[in-house]
Amino acid sequence: MSQVPTGTDRTAATVEDSMERRLADLLERKEQSRSPSSAKAVEAQHAKGKMTARERIDYLLDPGSFQELDALVRHRTHGVGLDHSRPYTDGVVTGFGTIDGRRVCLYSQDFTVFGGSLGEAHAEKIHKVQDLAVETGVPLIGLNDGGGARIQEGVAALHGFGGIFVRNARASGVVPQISVVLGPSAGGAVYSPALTDFVFMVEHTSHMFITGPDVVRTVTGEDVTPEQLGGARTHATRSGVAAFVAEDEKACLEEVRYLLSFLPSNNLEEPPSIPCDDDTDRVVPELRDLVPARPNQPYDMTQVIRSVVDDAEYLEYFPHWATNLTCGFARIGGRVVGVVGNQPEKLAGVLDIDSSGKGARFVRTCDAFNIPLVTFVDVPGFMPGTDQEYGGIIRHGAKLLYAYCEATVPRIQVIVRKAYGGAYLVMDSKSIGADLCLAWPSAELAVMGPEGAVGIVHRRELAEAADPEARRAELVAAYAERFTNPYVAAERGYVDDVIDPADTRRVLSRSLEMISSKREDLPRRKHGNVPL
């Protein structure tokens, strides 16, 4: 005789069946969220040499570490073109994962869904992951590939952008923010990357501009292509927007991973140290001959830097813009350092408007994230000329000065050759708070170079001399011997030590170890008023 199900058995069976149906429904919805666009749209994305939003996440993060959030979000707007199209994710994939085992939050815009345009729900997803990054103290990475505000959603889309911007500003200096522009970014969409700490772009596929080529052509009559107006090379060499440029998306995402290896997770942590196989007491004899004997002869400052840092690894910041100043991240004895150096190969290493702004931004970034600063000096002064004066070299030069004066991280200055006038002071001199100042025997510290000084101080004598050129040479040699050598400054304590160039790595390593526990409190205030 068959057993008749009791009421309890029937209820259990019904619940089990209900759970199976619910799980099946969930799996179906999740599957739809993972493939919200058509195969044709994905194919078009690949045809442009671009990965999809999820492919980028998979390539960037450690395998299997991504946890998606808000996968089932859809827009709730009624409007032209939206009523019958409500794909899951609403055009942006958000969540968290790890890079080299370290936690990160990120979002990745999906160009195959509404062209990656930003609507209300799309923005709210980004807001949530921004908040999560700050609350948990982890870096935020934005993979940007969208056409700006979603026109059909009107002011709600603009309001969403505003929420992103204010969170960018509030997170500034709290957690590292990295923007990776992997497609179009136009109008208001460009301001979020501009507010973040680092902007990456890809050649030929990344574009950023406030107004596109069509508007420019209509308003100004200029005929310009998207690549000329806002391509990666333009922003890397002319505008100073893109700190890093890569040949393709994979190289770009690999560079993001590399950059993160130098950054702490937040402003309360130290940058990550790693075991160092490069002997910190290593002597670098080639530095003795690297600086030319002639004071006006160029050389490559990055050779000095690579000779001194661990394993010659130097990640240069804005390597194609304002190249008369080099900045970047490296390690000495396994410790992360931010390096700033005048570049004699470009404009003799002079400071101008662009290099001052570049240096100021880098110094403030390092200070915000507890990265010690090492500054290599070979600067003849500030760039002269009406273009610079009219363009505000005073104001822009003051940015770099302010950044160094405000910085509380350990700071070491190394004077390699020329250190003249106000530019010497601005390049992290002892006078503005450097913890240690080292000089090579080739260092020249003075108000100006011997030639200029002699021309002013001995103007009358030279005019009356029987052989002005011979007399000038004698006076220049005497001035250099008396005033421009590093020993005059060392006598007064403006230089802490004059060192053999070959010992630079060893002395820097010991010095960084010594001042690593530096603590400095600034006066209580809301914030400083940097000369923007």
Image (cartoon, grey):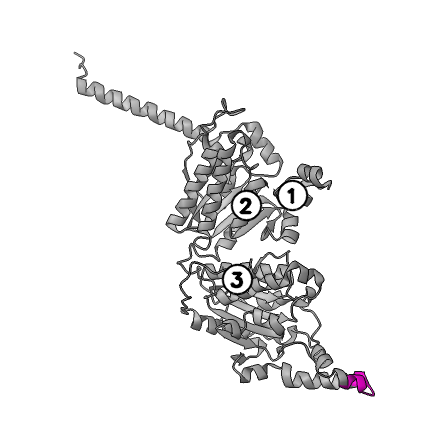
Residue under numbered circle 2 = 191
SS category of the residue bearing label 2: helix
**Closer to us: mark 3 or mark 2?**
2
Q: Nearer the viewer, residue 452 or 68?
A: 452
Which one is closest to the eye, mark 1 or mark 2?
2
Q: Is residue 292 visible?
A: yes
Q: Is residue 465 magenta?
A: yes
Is 222 placed left or right of 68 in the picture? right
Gap in angstroms between the C-alphas marked 3 and 2:
22 Å
- Residue 61 in sight: no
Task: Say which label, 1 or 2, has the lower sequence index.
Answer: 2
With respect to residue 93, does 328 lie above or below? below
Along the line of sight, the residue nearer the viewer: 254 or 181: 181
- Check disc 1 and report the residue beneath it: 204
Q: Which residues are magenta?
A: 461-470
Magenta segment includes 141: no
Q: Residue furthest top?
A: 1
Distance of label 1 from label 2 (alpha carbons)? 21 Å
Disc 3 marks which amino acid? Val
Name the front one of labels 3 and 1. Answer: 3
Residue 308 percent across, percent down from the top left: 55, 69
Q: For the C terminus, give its image quadrant.
A: bottom right
